Amino acid sequence: MIGRILAAAALAATVAALTTGSTLLLRSAYVLWGVVLIAWAISALSLRSLDVVRETRSKRGEVGGYAEEHLALRNRSWLPKLWLELHDEGMLPDHRVGRVVSSLGPGQSRGWTVRTLCRRRGSFTLGPMALVGGDPLGLFESRRELPATATFVVYPLTLPLRGVDLPSGYLSGGQVIRRRAEFTTTNVRGVRPYEPGEALSRVHWPTTARRGQLFSKEFELDPIADVWLLLDMERAVHTGELEADEDGATPVVPWIETPELTLDPCTEEYAVTIAASLGRHFLDAGKSVGLVTYGQRRVVVRPDRGERQLHKLLETLAVVRAAGREPLAQVLSTESTELTRQTTLVVITPTTSLRWIEGLRALGQRGVRAWVVLLDASTFGTAAPATPVIAALGAYSIPARVVHLGDDIASALQRA
């Protein structure tokens, strides 16, 4: 804008000088045109032979962790770059990668690393970016759009649940599934001759020493090997509000501050955090874990073990929202065919309805063990107390844990 005004002034001075024949006006026009042309040339060349390098350390993070990126500007030109700005239009909250570079000499590079505390779960877009250059006087501006984007997934917060386990009656005394397992479990079925390629950790050394040849342990499935997490995401039963992201909030300096994270005061975030924490806890214990939830759509993650299964669960929980329309009773009825005898169902819900408890009792008669984590919605907002639901669960001897707003979740899950 300023450059156009100056160019207009130069044009006016030129016209006036030619009209009046004034030497002063003519010299002024020369000076103005010289400033305008030099500034325009510097601005036009400011973004040529300039590379922007963006390197993301990881494509995923976890609430409470850090998203780290390294950015660099490289000048491949023989001309210096006098003024540059890099703007980022990404969606990750508080992720400020933009910079102003006052000067960049020929062949030089300028780089910086950005570490951002992940405060909110979800799938976010990094980029696009815009590179802006100009002349030292700020008369003209050049702009180049960098449309490349990347996806960064922030997993929900997972809490250590060292003292949390399924009710003791579920852990022992159950009917053993007499089915051979190809992986290591806590139940040893017997021994058999060693097969080439097997890990030495499977060798049963007492039998090997007694018989003079290698024998391997053979394992069978855990009686409660399959654990299903049923996360109730019906929109009508959730309450509380997400805290708004503050634009311009002071970023955390990771090597100085230890951030204190608190969950948003809504049942949705508490329920997702509980599901993620229980999923990690049971997978770490060697159990096979699956997930059912009806949020934006029906999602079923089949039971499995290992680190890969954990990432599947967390990726699903990172983006699920309380947007479902199906009540919990309907979900239980629809998904009952997935629940076989000797599996364990963990229901996480803030509902105050009682209709779903009869469905849970019917599953129990089929041999499906149930465990309920009930969020007391009355402590999060305007909702009925959870007392009738707790009483109904107790009447059917269904184990339950109750979580209130502000509770230490690990401690609340230990309390009967």
Image: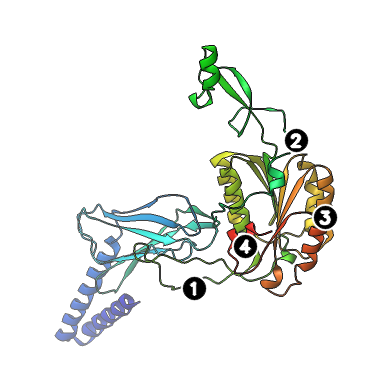
Q: Earlier in the sequence, mark 4 or mark 1?
A: 1
Quarter of the figure that contains the C terminus: bottom right
Image position of 176 (left or right of 144):
right
Disc 3, SS: loop
Observer-side mark, 2 or 4, equals: 2
Give me the residue at 61% from left, 27% from top: 182
Disc 1, SS: loop
In the rendered image, residue 155, in percent from the top left (x then y), is placed at 54, 54
In the rendered image, residue 170, in percent from the top left (x then y), is placed at 71, 44
Image: 59 above or below 24: above
Image position of 306 (left or right of 39):
right
Q: CA distance from mark 4 to mark 1?
A: 21 Å
The label on residue 246 is: 1
Count of numbered badges drawn on the protein:
4
Disc 4, SS: helix
**In the rendered image, which residue does mark 3 sit on?**
396
The one nearer the camera, 127 or 222, is: 222
Q: Amino acid at mark 2?
A: Gln
Q: Earlier in the sequence, mark 1 or mark 3?
A: 1
The one nearer the camera, 35 or 385, is: 385
The one nearer the camera, 209 or 362, is: 209
Give me the residue at 73% from left, 61% from top: 234
Q: CA distance from mark 2 to mark 4?
A: 34 Å
The label on residue 272 is: none
**In the rendered image, which residue does mark 2 sit on?**
175
Observer-side mark, 4 or 1, equals: 4
Is the residue under label 3 in contact with that under label 2 (CB below 8 Å)? no
Crowding around mark 3 (Cα neighbors within 10 Å: few <14, some 14 to 19, many 20+) is: few
Q: Earlier in the sequence, mark 2 or mark 3?
A: 2
Q: CA distance from mark 2 to mark 1?
A: 54 Å
